[in-house]
Image (cartoon, grey):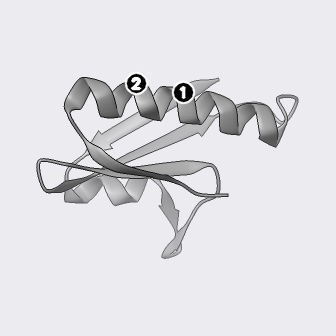
Amino acid sequence: MGFSAGYGDWSDRLVTGSGVRMPLTATARCDGEAANFAIRASKSIGDARRRVLLRSFAEDQVERHGCSGLRLTG
């Protein structure tokens, strides 16, 4: 399992595939730029648990970096 965080307009690449936002990702704004967060985990960790873990990670990153407007995708 691993988490990813990217800051800046390029960070959309962390959470999109073929121009479509991937599920179980999150986004926020930091100093007027995009911030994107993702989780990579085994299928043995169910979607509900991955969502909880992603939310916790993203909320921590938003607080640490003074970001706002956190949104999670499916």
Residue bearing the label numbered 1:
56
Q: Quadrant of the C terminus?
A: bottom right
Residue 57 at x, y percent in the picture: 49, 27
Residue type (three-letter) at the residue carrying disc 2: Asp
> Mark 2 — residue?
60
As measured in the structure, the alpha-carbon distance from the residue carrying label 1 to the one carrying label 2 is: 6 Å
Q: Nearer the viewer, residue 15 or 54?
A: 54
Q: Residue at x 77, y 31 (%)?
A: 49
Q: Mark 1 and mark 2 in contact? Answer it, CB < 8 Å.
A: yes
User: What residue is at 26 percent from the left and 23 percent from the top?
Assistant: 64
Q: Residue at x 48, y 55 (%)?
A: 15
Callout 1 amino acid: Ser
- In the foreground, 8 or 53: 53
Give SS at disc 1. Answer: helix
Residue located at (24% from left, 41% from top): 67
Kindly give the residue lying farthest to the left in the view shown. 31
Residue 41 x/y as whole percent: 70, 31
Dot 2: what SS? helix
